[in-house]
Amino acid sequence: MQLNINGQTHEVDADADTPLLWVLRDNLGMTGTKFGCGLAQCGACSVLVDGQVTRSCVTTVDMLEGTEITTIEAIEQDDVGARVVEKWVEHQVPQCGYCQSGQVMAATALLKEVAQPTEEDVRAAMINLCRCGTYNYIKAAIDDLSGRKGEPL
Amino acid sequence: MDMIKGLIPGVDPQDFTHGAPVNLSRRSVLRGALGIGAGAMVLGFGLPSGTARAQAAATMAPGSNVPAFLEIRPDSTVRLLSPFVEGGQGIFTGMAQIIGEELDADPSSFIVENAPAGADYLVIGGQMRITGGSMSVRMSYPLMRKLGASARAMLITAAADQLQVPASELTTEPGVVIHAGSNRRIAYGDLATAAFDLPVPDPETVALRDPATFRWIRQPVKRLDVYDKSTGRAEYSIDVTVDGMLHGAVQHAPRLGLMVETIRNRDQVAALPGVHAVEILDGAVAVVAQRWWTAKRAVEALEVDWVEGTDLPKGWRALPADFSSDAFAQELAAATGPETEAEAHGDAPGVLDAAQTVISATYHSQYLHHAQLEPPSTLARFNPDGTLDLWLPNQAPEQYQAAVAGLTGLEPAQINIHSPILGGFFGRHFLYPAASAYPQAIELARRTGRPVKVIWTREQEFLRDPMRPMAAVRFRGTLDDNGMPLAIEAVSATEGPTEAVYGHGDSVDETAVEGLSKKAYAIPNLRIAQVYVENPVMLAYWRSVGNSMNDFFYESFLDELANAGGQDPLALRKHLLRDTPRLTKLLEAVVDLSGGWKRGPFTAEDGSMRARGIGMASPFGSEAAAIAEVSIENGQVRVHDIWEVLDPGAIVNPMLVRQQIRGAAALGLSQVLMEEARWDKGEPVARNYDMYSILPPDQMPEIHVGILESGAPIGGVGEPPLPAVPPAVANAVAALTGKPVRRMPLSRLRFDS
Amino acid sequence: MTQRPDSPLKKRFSFAGIALIILAGGGWFVTRLPSSPFDGAAPQATPDLIARGEYVARQADCVACHSLEDGAPFAGGLEMGTPLGSIFATNITPDPQTGIGTYTLADFDRALRHGVTPDRRRLYPAMPYPSYEKMSDDDISALYAFFMNDVTPVQQAAAQSDIPWPLNIRWPLALWNVVFTTGQTYQTDPDQSEQWNRGAYLVEGAGHCGSCHTPRGMAMNEQGLDSSDPDFLSGALLDGWFAPSLRGDGAAGIGRWSEDDLFAFLSQGRNDHAVVFGSMTEAFNNSLQFMTDDDLRAISVYLKSLPGQGPGWQAQPATVTSLVEAAQSGLPGAETYMANCAACHGRDGLGQNEWIPALAGATSSQGTEPASQINVTLNGSGRVVADGMPDSYRMPPYRDRLNDTQIAEVLQFVRSSWGNTGTPVDTDAVADLRMRTDPASVAPIVLQMR
Ligand code: FES
Ligand code: FES
């Protein structure tokens, strides 16, 4: 089957119910998208499908033909994504970094949906787990992106 | 070997050894010449034989062999092989700051990777190195400064040679050697090859900078790894690939100690498309396949009959089929037996026995998962020359190297340990029996004759992740006429992680009692003891180790005593610390940070009833104090704010310290609020985050951070902020509800709003 | 949070009606041994017959109750909680002391089709003899041949029921049988095709589909044992699960399913409408999938012939499709759905092809009985193993991540979105099921027959 990933068409040989995550990581060697739980519980595997945040560990590839998939590898090619990365660096968000591909994708999807999300929007949308506890930093970075710059942490 | 000799004239492949003096400058020039980036693909080809390596044994003191650590590239960027593993704590940046300060190179010009296994990197007391115990900076600070200074001295010597001037006429600016007299400048990159072929100066003779002139140490230098970590470029063990690699997935026996009797459908599964092999391993079955997803599905399809194993691998604890953690908690609470004293002064038992009123309570802690977000993996590759390359998450390369040597019969020098950055660790990646994928990956690579990368699913990880120990602590306390503690006795029924991993001896295991013992409070009569109770499950270190639970016990019981004596908990602590200026100051600092002490209960602006609690801890050479503000929402505790001040004596990077305080506080909060690894009928109840909750974002309060630099000897940072948080929360809940909280996690208790 | 009871997987039957019956009846009738066509007959044991018997054992799903995951096949042990106490499935291996080793073919027949043991004790109708009585003589003797010759004898005494006296007196069940069983093997309907009749034979007989899917009366009797009864397979609550209608009911039944859909569901455990879950997973893993395509086809034909009632599901577009929209909507449960369910079941509730079931239009999303949805949300679902391969995706338990109110609200959202017409969910019902149930196993479970 054919998948459109980061603006390129990839011919993929995989069973219909293979999760996108493993097609990305193994078939295509795109390891920026992370495996954390495989059960839609953590969000480490988040990608964008047609601009919406999607947990790739539970998304079957047969659902994705004809969609546009964006992964962390191409996040800076997206204007919003590039701004998110810039703020992630400015606010020094990551610690171990393992959850951060997913966090950046979630933040990008949020800002694509709502250019200036309220605190309540941020609370609702940013639900990925981070074991290192970078939540305060994530919030600070998105607040900044939403025009609510506070004291840097 | 020949291939390399042929490719780069004059380069002896012996330079490729690990764990021996290696001229990294040349080695990396070679890499550059080959057009190979740093990382997985380059290491391990053309490695010399064991004999050649043995001849190249280390002769310099660990931590002093400059070329083993540093390479300066033609563009003057500095590649550092860090002796400590980066797993989120920012140690790469910290090391770049410390070394850069003395080398006179901007930390931002550093590229840092984890060092391989080898004697040069045994920088902790010249004996060992691990990444843990919050030791990285405090144990290596002087050594790493000297390393940077030595490198600078070598660059200056090389420049003196090149410019034909006395070294004393040369100075440096970041990345450049300067001869002011002739106004000549040479970039480090142009000197490195010559400089790093020079003998390394005696570290004792090199001059260090006056700390007053520090430009990077103590500054909030930005982390070197955040861009890569924000864009998916950072490479973890789970991401590493090599040519010709196959993927392995395992199904562990439902209980440790069971072994495979038969696989009923081995042939059918082996015949599945993409499946390369079905293998029986110690306490596990494995499928090796073209793709990991294929292997994972196939291994789940295996129908395995398990039997109680005989002759288990060393260190494995066969778990009883009826093991239940709830029952074990009861057992601990009732455990009698020899009490090994950890600390005693005055006559606590005598005073307590004679006391009119004794306050007694039994406290409980729970088993915990590390739950680091990156599941364990190992990539193993045997090379044609008999050496073995391993890529695996680890906090102790030499320990793994030695273990693999024992397992395979190879010489340590034939085993190349690659330590990619860690997707979280918290103590998970020390060497624990049965808890790592490396024996499996090695065995599968050996049997298939191909490199194999084994990845554990979260479900398989939660079946083998060793636990933070449980404890039941029996407290007795009594008060003097002023309502102040006169005697405290704490007897903890537990097993420390150290004795669990390395064997139980006669003396008390520090990691079992730390946080109960060595509290700074002036209690006239005190006795802290341990009743050793071996755990049926495998145990491990967990961030802040014994302190993670013991400070919860002690600080919460202290609040019980304060209540019994009609004392305010802050006033009580101040009284008990009246002769300890450092901690008095710390207490004042955290109270100030929180805007002044108000215990409550009080009504907050949003109408909710709230209260605050305080907790203190002295872990890993640092001091911490935290205040938490809580309310009850839908019968559960909500934490609104945490104020925490850490005094690690001195710091290297305040930004990193703040990050660690927030991260450790989050983990402490997660523990006290919701985490518990329950076992029932010999199996873990939770096999993924569905049933093992870790702190989600909407439960994260704002963590307000303060740092004190008392000037005391430099202490740890990564773990110390954790232990003060659980008791701060528990004491706040007790203040709000009027009932002491004697067990974690709070989610197992119900509170009326 | 309260502590969960540390109980094994339990099947719960409610035998409230038994008490009534105990008050009635008496005399020789209740202790007599019913006659069997096999009285005095010599059993056969050809390899063909034994093989056929093994297949009949699949049809009858004997393992489901008489084997435990970690026990020997057919050695018994499954605990079935009842309001009166627990009963335990017996050892049906041919062990002479503790099993059925001394049973003659006639004894075996009487136990299977009449619920009477050789020592004249009456079996509780947890044993589905009201269905099994429809099985043919040939199938009974084949089954006997299999159990006696191919099942390994295991010495393992059945655990004693803890139902107290006098409720543990079983002879009144003889009277129950008079009222609630027909005493007849399956009677072919000459107006229907051979295929239909085969399907009916399997569904009404060995398959005992009605045990779960037919509502029960006061005395725990199935209210309808064949296609002539409109209550037959019209959906029932049992053991914390609502086994939906297998009739052609619009929204609540399988009216929307084609015969092919049904066949796919029975043979693969999944189709574009649904995936087996709850107790059906066990029936599928252990038995259903091992039936021949012909038999599964016959079952499909038969079930599709059962008339139904009520309008079909009318799809409605999703009104909320993202976390932010959900939060802004203020709709109870919407945010919980988007955060916890949408990743798999879709922001639009439509699931992912046959891999992950749609909640939009699902039978469990309609009607007045939300037990299955509560149960599967609290406890997840067991792994579906088809053709030896466990499913790629499992439904995780949410009992730890969501409280009773959140579960009630999220189900309320599901049951009122996308055209679904289910009734609201009561928080107390969630709390009650939370107490009574345990999370599903993460490991694939297929019970072994040998
Ligand atoms: S890996 Fe997909 S949500 Fe955790
Ligand atoms: S940064 Fe480590 S898990 Fe989030």
Image (cartoon, coloured by chain):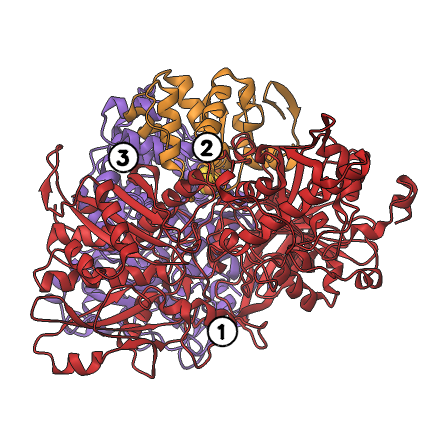
Q: Mark 2 lies on which chain?
A: A
**Closer-to-camera residue (B698/B667):** B667
Q: Which of A138 and B10 is in front in this view?
A: B10
Image mark for residue C42: 1
Q: Residues within 10 Å of mark 2 (few under 14, many from 20)?
A: many
Do marks 2 and 1 share a subunit?
Answer: no
- The answer to whether residue A58 is left or right of residue C13 is right
In the rendered image, the residue lying farthest to the front is B181
Q: Which amino acid does label 3 sit on?
A: Val
Q: Name the residue under label 2.
A: A92
Q: Which subunit holds the residue at mark 1? A: C
Disc 3: which residue: C410
List x then y, in percent, for residue C339: 35, 33
> Does mark 2's beta carbon lie closer than 8 Å to ligand 2?
no
Residue C241 image position (x, y, % from top left): 29, 47
Q: Tell me the distance, in whole angstroms, between the alpha carbons under discs 2 and 1.
A: 84 Å
Look at 23% across and 35% down and name the residue there. Answer: C409
Q: Residues within 10 Å of mark 3 (few under 14, many from 20)?
A: many
Image coords of residue C128 (percent x, y)? 33, 58
Nearer the observer: mark 3 or 2; the answer is 2
N-term mark: 1 or 3? 1
What amino acid is labelled 2 in the image? Gln
B377 with respect to B475 (left or right): right
Q: In this view, does C325 lie above or below C283?
A: above
Chain letter for the red part: B
